[in-house]
Amino acid sequence: MSAPCVCRHTSRFLLCYIHCIPLLLWPLAEWGSPVLAVMISFLVLGIEGISSYIEEPFHVSRICDVRGAVSVTVRRF
């Protein structure tokens, strides 16, 4: 299984999980569950974003542009 397939699967699972959070929190927090759901969703999606950056740092960051600029500079010398 390739990395993009795993990333898509993980993102879909997280979205399903995030949509279920308010229903799961209702018995514990009642009207506070939307606030808790937003906070948990923010943290989970932040972790997912960090993990995608760690998994493929050269596709997420602008390192390819930096590499191109460095290679042009080196070729001039």
Image: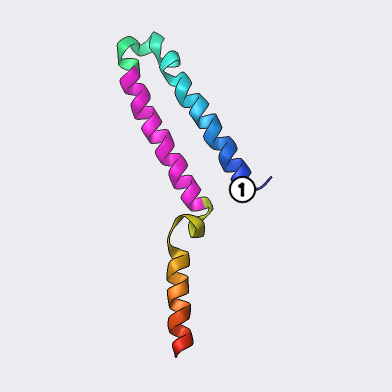
Left/right of residue 76 with respect to residue 1 in the rendered view: left
Q: Quadrant of the C terminus?
A: bottom left
Front residue of 21 and 5: 5
The magenta stretch spans residue 49: yes
Kindly state the secondary structure of the residue where label 1 is placed: helix
Q: Position of residue 36 (x, y in %)?
A: 34, 22
Which region is colored magenta?
34-54
Q: Quadrant of the N terminus?
A: top right
Q: What residue sits right under mark 1 in the picture?
A: 3
Residue type beneath disc 1: Ala
Q: Position of residue 59 (x, y in %)?
A: 50, 57
Residue found at x 60% / y 46%: 4
Residue 60 vs 47, above or below: the answer is below
Residue found at x 44% / y 77%: 70
Image mark count: 1
Q: Position of residue 18 (x, y in %)?
A: 45, 26
Residue found at x 56% / y 36%: 10
The magenta stretch spans residue 25: no
Examine the image and state in which quarter residue 46 appears: top left
Front residue of 37 and 69: 69
Type of secondary structure dominating the magenta stretch? helix
Residue found at x 30% / y 15%: 32
